[in-house]
Image (cartoon, rainbow, N blue to C red):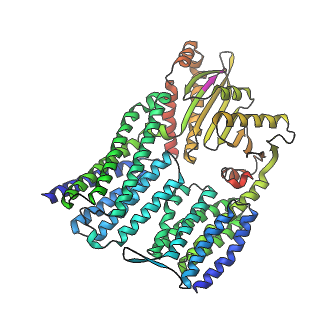
Amino acid sequence: MMNGIISIMMAITVFLSFIAMVRILLFRERLFILFKIVVVLTMLSMLFKALGVMYGCKFFTRIYLFGTMVGMSIFIMQLNRLSFRSLAINYINATLVVASVFEIALVPDNMIDPVCTILPIRNAIMTIISVEVFILASILVIRIHGLKAPFGKLVKWEEKFSTALIVETGIFMGISITFLHSLFHLLPKEMAIFNIIAICLIAIMLVHIVFIVSSTPFFVAFSGVEAIAVILGGVKVAEIGHISNNIIVALEKTQASMIRAVLRDKILIYWRSTIKAGGSIRKLSLIILGWKYEEPTERFFNILSMCIRDRISRDYILAEKLMDIDTLIRQIESPIPPRFLGEEFTYALRKFRDII
Amino acid sequence: MYIYVIAIIVGVSILLFSIGKTAGVSRLWLYGVLFAAVVVSEIVVFLCVDVLAYWLGVRVSIAYLVGSIGLSVLICMGAKAAEFEERFIIFFASPFVILYVLNPYVGITIGLFLAITINASISENIFREHNFRGVLSSALSGFLIALSLITLSLSALALSTLCVFLYFYNIKILKQNVVEKEIDRMGVYFVDEHSENIIRIIGLLETELDSKVDLLMVDGEIFLCSDFYIWKLDAKSRFTHDLLKNLHLEEIKK
């Protein structure tokens, strides 16, 4: 009976991991490359786990234990890359993993059980890692919620979907604490069933995370774009996020037509042009402000600024949309970001993914 | 054989540390301490005065533990100071060098992977600017990596990590080549109207965005900024792009 449950659960887990692997490998995105490694590593670990259970091989089980530890620490590394970007967190986690690798490699065979292995150091470290995952996931979700106001519909769906991440990482934390607790209290048979259910739950969590990550709104939240402002004739006609009026006034006063500032943690792009249509000449400016994450996101900013510039120029010259005073007033007064900015964002993202 | 390798490493380290000093590398003493920890640990093992500890029934060499930890921190320091894109991965992978204590082959393999990653970036950057210097630095780092592979020595890996000093030295020369004009930001010397506008934009951005401007491009003019000076760079120089790739290096702000 128990063996039957374990086999069915293992089959479901391997199947889910396989779905997650296919989905993430089809996703062309360098910013989330570590997620790809995690998913592939998980898939391989699950296979080793299944082989270990089938053949009762301790060596395969040791590989599974090692693979899951490395996978979890890479998962934290990815969350860290999107939140704190702290190198120290990476180093400390890797050191913890090394300590657990020592234990996995050195413990005698009688402590390794292919169905359910609980090792004191490994499980203590797993609990620490699960707490870290929970904290980092909460920070990401808070950030997505914070972006709802400026980005409007672009992250609306993502906001609800991401909240589930907190529940899932909370479950993962609970599972890890139960494992640690079982070292002193629970029976091996109970733990074997709990273990297989826990692995299945983690696989479901993995599939969910893969689908979150590969969505466009997730990139919107973590591309680093903080604010975009379009200024026509000295008047701010469209805005996503917030750019201080002092910056706008100061940049408008300069005679420069192109300014690009790279700050320690931010990037600012300012572009200005004059547009002639219907006998009138107007000054058109665009400001993009974003967090400086990595080289690819810098490239994304450039593509985005080009897309918006082209769109505005096209609209102004061909359809003279921005000259329409009613539209202008509506856009200035409306708290919702204009539709064309959202459209250009999606288009720029598609272009960016074609290039990388 | 083993002690001869250590002798070669110590000898060559003089060259690299002197280059580091010339390049004005910050916290050079810390690099020295970590490198010495690796070398001394290997000498201790060679002289058979090592202390062994027992953990889970296996003998663990304390000297190798200290040496491998020293190497892992040294690799992280090198990668962080050089601001390579790969540093995020290097910080994750470097503690795995400590597995040297458990199995030298595993430790050395991981160490080699890290050393090759760092040295490939160093050589790539030097090559862009100067082919001959690139060949020389590649030859030196290649020799050290090969030496560590042959002798399973940590100290050769540690020294290959110190090749990052060659990179800093190269950056220093690069900066001298591309700076066209130096603008005093502290107001000690007189500046013209154009320079004053640039200072004003930088000041405004720093105040409003609560950050430090590293680079400012205004209509094709390029300005590199530190706390005290702003350097106008030669936009036509082929070396300018290479310098801009290293914006966050402390060495170019001096």
The answer to if A147 sits in the magenta stretch is: no
Q: Work out which residue is located at the far left of the displayed protein and give it.
A: A1
Foreground of the two, A331 or B168:
B168
The count of marks equals: 0
Q: Is residue B58 left or right of residue A260?
A: left
Viewport quadrant of the N terminus of chain B: bottom right
Q: Position of residue A294 (x, y in %)?
A: 56, 47
Q: Work out which residue is located at the far bottom of the displayed protein and give it.
A: B1
Q: Work out which residue is located at the far right of the displayed protein and give it.
A: B190
Q: Position of residue A145 (x, y in %)?
A: 44, 33
- Please identify the dominant SS of the magenta region: strand
Residue beneath the point at 44% across and 52% down:
A76
Q: Quadrant of residue A115?
A: bottom left
Foreground of the two, A227 or A100:
A100
Query: Can residue B121 be seen in the rendering of this structure?
Result: yes
Q: Is residue B137 left or right of residue A160?
A: right
Query: Can residue A32 be seen in the rendering of this structure?
Result: no
Q: Position of residue A153 (x, y in %)?
A: 44, 28
Q: Work out which residue is located at the far front of the displayed protein and give it.
A: A184
A182 w.r.t. A301: above or below: below
Q: Is residue B201 left or right of residue B30?
A: right
Residue beneath the point at 31% across and 49% down:
A174
Q: Position of residue A217 (x, y in %)?
A: 44, 36
Q: Quadrant of residue B67?
A: bottom right
Q: Is residue A253 left or right of residue A264?
A: right
Stretch in magenta? A230-234
Foreground of the two, B195 or B44:
B44
